[in-house]
Image (cartoon, helix red, strand yellow):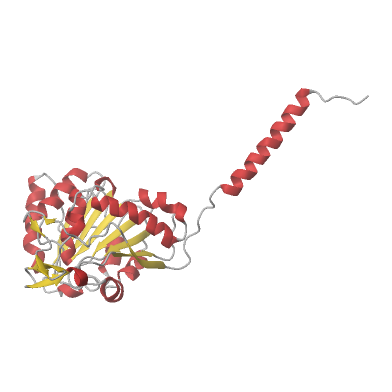
Amino acid sequence: MTARRSPSVVLPALAGLVAAFVGLLVAMIAPVAAAPLTEGNGDIVAFANSPFPYAGIIPIKDIPFLDVTEGARRGHTSPRAGKVYWEDETYSDRRSLIYFPKGFDIDRPAVIVVFFHGNSATLERDVVARQQVPRQVAGSGLNAVLLAPQFAVDAVDSSSGNFWTPGIFARYLDEASAKMAAVYGDKSARAAFARMPVILFAYSGGYNAAAYAAAVGGAEDRVAGVILIDALYAEEDKFADWFGRNRSHAFLFSAYTKSAAPSNAILGELLTERGIDFTRRTPPRLTPGTVALFATDPELVHDDLVTRAWVKDPVAWLLGRVEGYLR
């Protein structure tokens, strides 16, 4: 006669087998912690939520951006250039540069640096080759991904395009999280990029896009800091108001030569009116609550400031002082 096993023996054994099987499944599907990148990785990719093309209204002026037509072509009159730039040549590049430095570690605190280039610039020729922004991000030691949208192509124009529209900058960042995950090589990393804080870094004419991104971009809670290099020629109230609302978790740094001195003086007055203290020296660290308006040598060459300013490679120098995100 075959002996029957007691339920008190069978059930624990079955439970043990089930637990082991579930553990095996979890081990098979759970993501493996990503190692730091062994080499830099980047690409220039097209975005749907790009600054351009733009067919809307210029804020404050309340006039159409595209104000000239010639047959089927549409164009924008640039007062500073004293000429018409055509949409198909100047305002149709939807691309952004995405770059990960060697050693980037998605499992450590990380930040997105959004770089707003100045006038007469292209991503390949100026941001990458001449100003060497990716190299400087890598040299900073910051655990960061660089994101640089193309604005007006090789034009004397500081227009922000779609970034003038409330909420569009947040949509750009949301789209960027998927684009960055693809360049990074792991589409499941999208959620991590969507949570990362953002530093707005503007040079020269990039001030306009940075001001609108901070003021009406819809991502205010993610912006951990604003850095301006000779990049304040208007919109001072937007920067002052933004910092007044976000001083508990953000910093503001502006370095300038004589061309941007008047606007920095205005910004200083606006900050003082709001009871916000600031230093006129370079701070040892860029931490929440820090504000610095730093007058460099007024004779420095504006066109060279991204690589040769009060120090060599100021982008690397500044990003290396951002606290909490070092590789």
Residue 313 % position (x, y): 27, 70
Looking at the picture, tell me which residue is in the foreground, 283 or 17.
17
Residue found at the very far right of the displayed protein: 1
Question: Could you say which quadrant of the image residue 163 lies in?
Answer: bottom left
Q: Residue at x 8, y 60 (%)?
A: 263
Can residue 128 be seen here? The reply is: yes
Looking at the picture, tell me which residue is in the foreground, 1 or 289.
1
Residue 101 % position (x, y): 40, 65
The quadrant of the image that shows the N terminus is top right
Q: Residue at x 33, y 68 (%)?
A: 134
Looking at the picture, tell me which residue is in the foreground, 117 or 265.
117
Looking at the picture, tell me which residue is in the foreground, 264 or 61.
61
Q: How many labels does the image show?
A: 0
Q: In this view, does 318 lie above or below 108?
A: below
Q: In this view, does 252 lie above or below 127?
A: above
Residue 206 % position (x, y): 19, 63
Left or right relative to 161: residue 317 = right
Residue 129 % position (x, y): 30, 76
Can residue 108 be seen here? The reply is: no
Left or right relative to 239: residue 130 = right
The quadrant of the image that shows the C terminus is bottom left
Left or right relative to 90: residue 32 = right
Residue found at the very far front of the displayed protein: 71
